[in-house]
Image: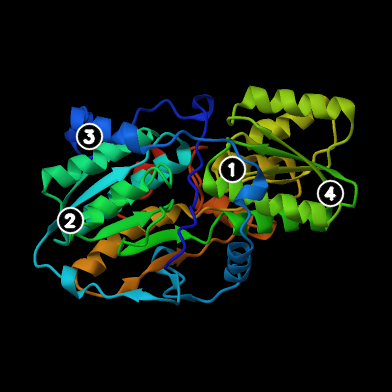
Amino acid sequence: MRRSILTKVTVVAATSLLALTACTTDSSIEDPPTEDTTAAAEETAPAAEETSSDEWFVQEVYDDQFEQRSATFEGDPEQPWLQYIDGEMTDTAEYAADGAQKACFANASISNPWRQTGWITMNEQLKALQDSGVISEMETRDAQDDDNTQIADIDYFIAEGNCDAFIISPNSTAAMTPAVERACETGKPVVVFDRGVETDCAVTFIHPIGGFAWGIDTAEFLSERLEEGDKVVALRILPGVDVLEQRWAAAERIFEENGIEAVDYFTGADPTEIKDILADELATGDVQGIWMDAGDGAVAAIEAFEDAGADLPVMTGEDEMSFLRKWEETGIDALAPVYSNFQWRTPLLALEQIFAGEEVPAEWILPQTPITEEERGEFLTANEGMPDGHYAKFGGEDMEGYPEVWQERQIP
């Protein structure tokens, strides 16, 4: 059975979000869930719990992702959204179909810049597949980061009976598993991406390498540049999100192995909270490193050192443009890990292959390569004119709406 290791979406507090509401390609998103599906969702979704990093550390998966960081990917490197690590394939001959097909997308949310960037890219890919006659429409329901709502959304699609295929980006893992299984039971192809669920019934599960790989890349980068006994402050968004927890579980182990003193705080990506935390830390001693499980709030972290007149730290952030620009401005020693935003194209392109009856990877693992100091200038130039909330590795440069729809944040 395929492992259902969850893969990130960075869930951030409202203080760090763009002033946007959840949008969709279909007006049905505004329909309230029915009484029956709401009740079913309330019975199914468990409450979130805060757990320790030890509970999220799985040695086998850690080892797999360690090796996958240097794996050879099949496919054209100029189209990383179609690359994958060679492995088990799914025969999709039974799903071959003539003519344009309808996709139904149950989305966790577009509540943060990472998801908004991906949602724009996904809709540009949708337009291309509509023009080529592969997909007729994509009816979308947005759960706005709520398990119960997403369960109701999936059940709505099933009851509606008009979906030729399901795409699901789960809000959480355990809660969403029964609903995904119900979608699979319809006999229609199901594509899961971004985060996983505890079932392998989907035709394909699409995601970058994962949280452990992020944690390894970032903690090794910091450990190589710091001395034993140096202090790292880890700024974390929130507890209980698998891929975020896996990032920290991996990083914490590496810091311990290298004698790095690491303390972690949950910040909700609130810039004020981040500055307060670092002001307190800097008031009591030196901080040599900053580790983040997502890029939101990275600029505030750097500004906290500037405000205190302290030496700037060695730091890891993310490929969000605000961080890349602050990195260049300050000249800090930094790394931008990525959770490849171009993955938002892949589910629709997977459906194109599935409707053609072509094999697809059972677990579609996409490249996940950090941006280094040597590459930063290249990505800044390539994304010139993009807003601060844009993600450098969004993978939409070859699409008809580039660059205007991303520059203007034309969210459907």
Question: Do the residues under discs 2 and 4 have CB atoms within 8 angstroms?
Answer: no
Amino acid beneath label 4: Ile
Sequence order check: which comes first, mark 1 or mark 2?
2
Question: Do the residues under discs 1 and 3 have CB atoms within 8 angstroms?
Answer: no
Residue 214, image x, y percentages: 61, 55
Residue farthest front in this picture: 43
| Residue 80 found in image quarter | bottom left
Name the residue at 69% across, 40% down.
Answer: 329
Q: Which residue is mark 2?
A: 186
Residue 305, image x, y percentages: 78, 31
Sequence order check: which comes first, mark 1 or mark 4?
4
- In the image, is residue 34 above or below residue 253? above
Q: Which residue is mark 3?
A: 37
| Residue 76 found in image quarter | bottom left
Residue 226, image x, y percentages: 85, 52
Q: Which residue is mark 4?
A: 260
Q: CA distance from mark 1 to mark 4?
A: 20 Å
